[in-house]
Image (tube, grey):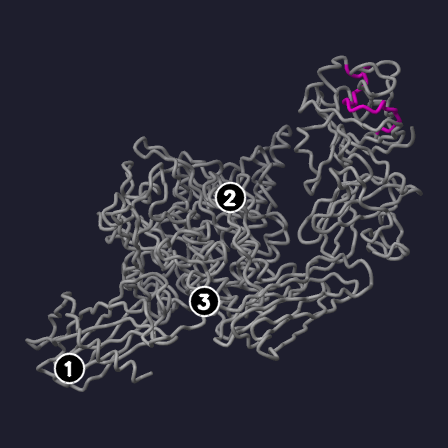
Amino acid sequence: MKLSQLISGLVLLAALTGCSKNYLEREIPVNYGEDEIFVSYERMSKVGYGVYTFLFNRFGFHRIDNAMLASASDEADHADVNSSIQRYNMGIWNAASNPEDCWAYFYQGIRRANLFLENSTDYKNIIYRDTIDAANKAKYEYNVRDIEWLRAEVRFLRAFYHFELIKRYGGVPIMEKATGNVEELQAMTRKSFDECVEYIVSECDAVLPQLKETWVGFDSERWRGRVTRGAALALKARLLLYAASPLHNPANDVAKWRRAAEAAHAVIALNRYSLHTNYKDLFRLGNGADGNPEVIFAQHGWSRNDFEMYNYPIGYDQGGRGSTSPSQNLVDAYDMKATGQPIGEPGSGYDPANPYTGRDPRLALSILTNNTTFKNRPVECWVGGLDGLGKTRATTTGYYLRKFVDEGLNLAQNQSSMHTWILFRYAEVLLNYAEAMNEAYGPETTGGMTLTAKKAVDMVRARNGIQMPPLPPGLSQAEMRERIRNERRVELAFEEHRFFDVRRWKIAMQTENKPIMAMSITRNDNNTFSYQVVKAEDRQFTERMYLYPIPEVEVLKSNGNLTQNTGW
Amino acid sequence: MKHTILKFSAVAAVVLLAACAKVRLFPDTVSDEVPQLKEAAAQFLWIGPEYKLALQAKLEDGEGISKVRIKNGEWEIDSVLTVNNQQSFAINDTFLVVKDVNATKHAVELTITNSKGGVVKTTVAVEDLSAENQIPGYSPDLVPPAITVTKPTVTKYLGFTNDAIDLELEADIKDTKITSVEVRVWGETAAGEPLLVEDVKTPANADEEKDFKYARTFSLPAGKVGEYQYVVRSTDAAGNKSVKGGTITVGYIDRLYLSDAETEAEVLNQGFDHYGNARGIGTLLSMKKQGANTFEADFYYRNEAADNIRFVAFLGTDMPFINSQKQVNYTLSGPNVAAMSATESGKITTSLASAGFKLPVSQKGYYKVTVDMTARTVKVTSFTPPAPADATKYPGWTAASPWPYMAVTGASVVGTNGWTEVATSPKLAKEADHPYLYTGTFKTQGNSENISFNAPTAANADVWGKGWFRMTAARANMKDDYGSLVTTVGPVGPSGGGANWGFSLSQAGTFKVTYDIVLQRMRAVRTGN
């Protein structure tokens, strides 16, 4: 009964808690029985919109016991030692206790999708019954069209939730119907990773023509944020990149890289998306889809200030309690602006006495470093400073998070602002493309497409306001691989990519076993600063952790049909 | 080298540091004793070109030491020594490590186990001696060769002719001792035809080892769209490398304009704007760039015998009008002009002798024209523009009853008297078979006063409040698809609508004008005095 546990408690619609805006905001006044749902457009559509609610809680911000997923990677340390995120870092998590277990959650979302898809097949008749008045013809046509789109969107979400499962667990059972039959559920077995990939690809391809190209400019903008063709293409691109990566492609089949490159190129060829001209504002727009040409698909956020409460530096009198402490490991990854070189290269221009001067502008836009002005005063990360190391709940690394943080909030007055988590954005697509192209064709060959790997990376580096020098020409494939990986680390920092990237690249044994380093800063008598790197925390990563364990309870209930991942 | 290391290790051992006090006892041991770390020291050393961690320690245990684990996370050291139950054991070891980018506080973790299972874990602070090289006089050459590429100075080529492109590559390389210079030119045409030329040079004498002048001409494929890279890479005697390079494109266009000038005279006499310095109201239509090398524009095609449709391409900062856009910078038969093939429908040719100058359709109408300069194709898709519906901007205009004309008003227009229509006002008459096109001729007096178009008074009682056609925004914002000044004329509703800019054809003379009220394109050509 491996999956029955996931669904036994599901009361249809009762759990359809809407989120804060528009279609996600709809609420149902009473609980209905299943046979009372698919009788009208209003009730039926709410079931479909309800599938969107599973985009919450397992993506973004401080969702894991108040910690960001970044704090379980070499991007950051989490200041609260009691948070369950620390289990990852100490290596004390297992099949019975996984701080970020997603198995049940995404299968609930998948079942909700299946319920909608199975019961809305006769939607035209249902809507016709609902709008039999001839005067309602326009409403009928609108509603029919809406359900047609919604059915495609729900299929996308079902595919997306399957992807979120396989990137954590490897191959999983594919659920295409909302069965409640215990025997049938117990008999389900895991598909191979590649079988799951082909299923998700086929779903993306199938729904593509049925999805809207954009919701911008439609029906007074009320539907912005729904799934688009770009989202389906972007999911396919990310999926095929994972499938081509060393974790899932140990023989390095180049055809897989070519396929991933072509999938990413399909997004680029849409010519719909472009890089936002302000890296800071990109993450601070209320709704990721509002006038933001970079956002392909986003979790439609709501107004809140808890993220700022957790991430403002500790010395601010508005409730800040430093939580996400960016690591020195990450800080060192930002190149020098003038030369475009890594800080360790001879001639890079890096000055250890002024370690934050002349760096890639994305450092200052992502991480609060010592003496940076924040809310009208310099951040004091030095030992003994207002925000410095050693204070309870202060940074453990000498740095605070700046990306996603709204500096303008007055927490004492409980001010809040919209926080939207971007799920797919154009810069990631360009970097997906660059990585796949480099592996398939090398750094500077188009392979019949419009961009080389180098050009795609250079586009990301050349974003308005960032304008990092292009990568040097003539890099070898291995050199380009390292540069692309570093570019992902910097451009996509804290966006829940690095945690999975080091796994799919199969380098986590190196990166995740290195200690998290911190910057110990001393203020000198003449108000200058001295900097010394110190160890903040040791990390533990073993071979089995490349994939999550299937939750123990699910394995036990499956009568042996659900095989556990190696090592767990 | 090993001798040197041992010597330094021995010196360092004299100043052994006490072990860190962070001792942990493990209760599962059956022994009353745990191993003792008597002395320990560690140094971070720069020795020749390498950085090393030197570790010395003395261990003792009455039960006998079975193993020692040496660990450091940031340097990825994790080494286990099997000791064979010796009661005393000395560690004197070195590990290759990487240079610190920042000053870093390091520590080595020792985990010592005795034969009874007693364990002690302790850390040894690392003394940083890496500021000076341990080999006196060691002064490595860390500076890579300096490469200055002096050619190519041109990196973009139209590639419209069938002549191969000569890529001149020149570079000046300087270093204390250059050992090699490698030059590579590679890439492919858009059709996938690869090109790879490699050239490796070695300095022939001592002078060239210090200053190497590289020069060679490479040949790029003729008449084909393609993208190529070049790199100059140099290595010196110390193994330092540097590289410089760039990209060469052939056939990748920065600006493309559709020209419907029937003659060269129409090119030279296309209209000026209010200040006489922007010529966007003439016979060129800028095409919006879509992707790497594709261009698109909405266009009304007349499908007449006199059609003369051409595409005018520009690279880099080159543009159709120069000197504040006054001076025409192209001709209809210039080297940057392409047109439809006379023989292959839908294909673009850069050989005007074999061009047809028509669009690949047989009906007049509105078309979205898409030119792919990589595939050298033109695609036209018919579309129906939405009819004017704004009662303030288009008062009285309906599809069933379009205006019969638009009045031309303004003090500089001959036959007018001020800003409202009078009996003698020149008019643009609605074309007989078209609801949106208004064509006519009028004469200007040559000053720079504004001109407007107006809805006919018979259709518009509110002559000041509705039906004015002027520049639609502040002049500085009137840019074509490439940021050059253009004078788009659009409906602004009341006379003061928008920024209240009219337009002017500042050179006195007679102008033939066609205005399209849905595409807002004004095509003005001076036809005489």
Looking at the rendered structure, the kind of residue marked 3 is Trp
Which quadrant is the N terminus of chain B positioned in? bottom left
Q: In which quarter of the image is residue B269?
A: top right
**Residue beneath the point at 17% across and 73% down:** B15
Q: Is A104 one of the magenta-colored residues? A: no
Front: mark 3 or 2: 2
The answer to whether A348 is drawn above or below residue B307 in the figure is below
> In the image shown, does A138 or B250 lie closer to the viewer?
B250
Evaluate whether label 3 is on the same chain as label 1.
no
Q: Position of residue B320 (x, y in %)?
A: 77, 44
Secondary structure of the residue carrying tag 3 is: loop
- Name the quadrant of the C terminus of chain B: top right
Q: Residues under labels 3 and 2: Cα distance?
A: 30 Å
Query: Magenta region: which residues?
Result: B438-460
* Residue A153 placement (x, y as % from top left): 54, 48
Q: Is residue B186 above or below residue B513?
A: below
* Tag 2 subunit: A
B282 left or right, relative to A252: right
Residue B65: assigned label: 1
